[in-house]
Structure formats: structure tokens, C-alpha cells
Amino acid sequence: MVYEEELLTEKVCKLYDQISNLESLKPCKNVDTLFTQLVHTCMPPSPIDVTKLSTNVQEIRTKLIRLCGEAEGLLESHYSTILGNNSYENPLHYLNIFPYYSNYLKLALLEFTILNQHCTKNPSKIAFVGSGPLPLTSIVLASNHLPTTTFHNYDIDPLANSKALRLVSSDHDLSKRMVFHTNNILDVTNDLEDYEVVYLAALVGMDTGEKKRIIDHLAKYMAKGALLMVRSAHGARAFLYPVVNPCDLIGFEVLSVFHPTDEVINSVVIAQKCLMPTHSLENGLGSMLQSNCSNETKVSNPLINGNVTEELVTKEELS
């Protein structure tokens, strides 16, 4: 097992060397090939714990996550431009030209199923933080699963929002239910109380400190009882995306954590804003979550053909 983990780490580091030496991360044959190899290397379930890697590999992982984020943004921008600039009557009918569209369909179904397990009714307003130029999650959820919900999409990049708005503007239904805000989420305060559910994209907060600052901000301003959906990563997939552990979610009660084992890369954490003030959690539920960080109970879950591992974090386990 140790030998397999060493081989995995060695292969990832070699791919990092190749990717970091590229002149550009814009979509092209060479870029696409290298990132496809990286994803296929990290996709199989692995017991590897990235927190126990050497300092050098930890630094490579941090840099690799940023490179993946940059490449993902450029890929989405590229296809959003193609869809928005062509004479499609409705660009949303051609989203399948995006190479990973089927993955987003599966991820949105997974997240909707998880959400449905913890909601008594469909939310009227959802915020998606880090929606980007091709807001596929919001589009798929609004089109396929939540036909009456309004989606407020937050992104720090005005160009990304401009491209996203162009995509939905020709759709009679979604143009009324998709709102775009150009904001750093850390500057959004009281408006966060308006949402029953807040999604936090995987690449919003690229390192642990930044991610925790954002989560702390959401804990401060989200409505009590509102749900937070956070994308994370597990095993070797943590070379591609930042990891969010239950103990990072101070101010929230973690309801469950789902680790897909198929081509859906992101894990999904769902948590509920605590009804008690955040400051009272410092020596209460927060410290219990901290001690429980690496001791969640794992069970199988039949969601999406059984390709999911679920970690349940219940009140009983925290007490």
C-alpha cells in the first residue's frame, strides 16, 4: 500500500513538473492531455492522506491546486465564449459541447439528492459562491431539479459574470431566475440572510486559511438554520481541489459528507448554520468537531449506483 502511494505521488509530481512548465494553461491539445492524465491518476479511490506527505510534496500540491483552478477557469471561459458568441437561439441547448458537462449533470443530481434529504421543501432562493463564466451547477439545478428556485450567483470577476449572463439571457425562464453579483463574498454581509441554501464552490478559497476565513464569514452572516453545501476532495483527489474537513465548519452542524468514487471528482459536505451564536461554539460544539475531525463513521450509500462513500457526523457522535 505504501509503495502504491509512493508511485501515485511520484506520478503526480511528474505531471506537476510538466504542467508548471507550460507557456499557457489555455485549452489546447497538450494542456488537455496533461490535465486528463492528472485527473485519471487521481480519480481511483485511494487511502492516501495528503496531510501526511512531505513538506516538498505539500508545496507541490498547493501549487498544483492553483494551476488546476486557473486551467479550469480558462476552460470554462473558453466554452462560455464559444456558446455566447455563436448565433445559437438558446446557448443553453448546446451545453453538451463542454467536455465535462456529463460530470456536472451527475454532480448536480448528487447535490440535489443530498439537499432533498435535509430540506422539507424546495428553497426559494439559493446563493452560489464562485459561479464563474459557465455556471453549470446553477443552470442544471434550475433547469432539471429546482424549477421555481431563484439562483443568486456570486463571482469576484466581472468578465465571468458578463459571460454567464449572456448565456442565460436568451432563456425565457432562467433569465428571470438567475441573478449575477460581482462581489468578493467577504464583502457580502446582511444579504446572506436571504438564502435558505448557500453553495461554496471548490475553488473559492484555494488554501486552508482562505477557505476557513470564507466559512467563518458565512457562519457569521447566513441565516440561522440555513444550509451550506461545500465542495471538498478526498484521497488522491485532494491533489486537484482543497479539502474541507468537518472541523473546519465552526458555526455549523455538519450533517453528512459524501465521497463519490466515480468520475464525479468533488466530495460534498452539507452543514446547517447553528441556532446558537458562533462565539458560543468556541469551547462547545466547535471543540467537539475539532476532536472528531478524523473520526467520522463511514457507511455505504446507494446514491448514484453505490459509487459514494458517506461519512455521517451526527449529534450522537459529537457528544
Image: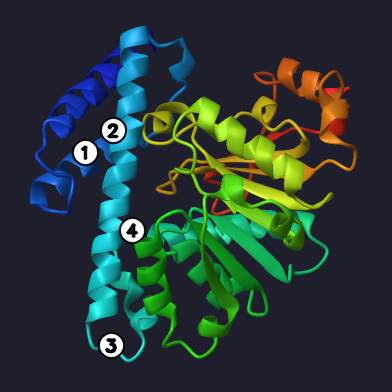
In space, the residues marked 2 and 4 are separated at their CA atoms by 17 Å
Q: Earlier in the sequence, mark 3 or mark 4?
A: 3
Number of residues whose C-alpha sits closer than 10 Å to that of mark 1, classed few (under 14), some (14–19) or many (20 or more)? some
Query: Can you give x and y, in whole percent of width and height, for residue 242 in the image?
Result: 46, 33
* Side of 60 relative to 168 (left or right): left
What label does residue 250 carry, if any?
A: none
Q: Do the residues labelled 2 and 4 touch (CB within 8 Å)?
A: no
Residue tagged by mark 4? 100
Q: Do the residues labelled 2 and 1 touch (CB within 8 Å)?
A: yes
Give the number of the mark in front: 2 or 4. Answer: 4
In space, the residues marked 1 and 4 are separated at their CA atoms by 15 Å
In space, the residues marked 3 and 2 are separated at their CA atoms by 36 Å
In space, the residues marked 3 and 4 are separated at their CA atoms by 20 Å
Number of residues whose C-alpha sits closer than 10 Å to that of mark 4, classed few (under 14), some (14–19) or many (20 or more)? few
Query: Can you give x and y, in whole percent of width and height, for residue 311 in the image?
Result: 67, 34
Give the number of the mark in front: 3 or 2. Answer: 3
In space, the residues marked 3 and 1 are separated at their CA atoms by 33 Å
Residue tagged by mark 2? 41
What label does residue 37 carry, if any?
A: 1
* Side of 306 relative to 8 (left or right): right
Q: Which is more toward the observer, 224 or 57?
A: 224
Question: Which amino acid does the dot numbered 4 rest on?
Answer: Tyr
Q: Earlier in the sequence, mark 1 or mark 4?
A: 1
Instruction: Quadrant for residue 97, please give it.
Output: bottom left
Q: Which of marks 3 and 2 is nearer the N terminus?
A: 2
Query: Can you give x and y, in whole percent of width and height, for residue 276 in the image?
Result: 90, 38
Classify the position of the N terminus by image quarter.
Answer: top left
Give the number of the mark in front: 3 or 1. Answer: 3
Query: Element type at marker 2?
Result: helix
What label does residue 88 carry, if any?
A: 3
Question: Which amino acid does the dot numbered 1 rest on?
Answer: Gln
User: Image point 23% across, 21% down: which residue?
Assistant: 13
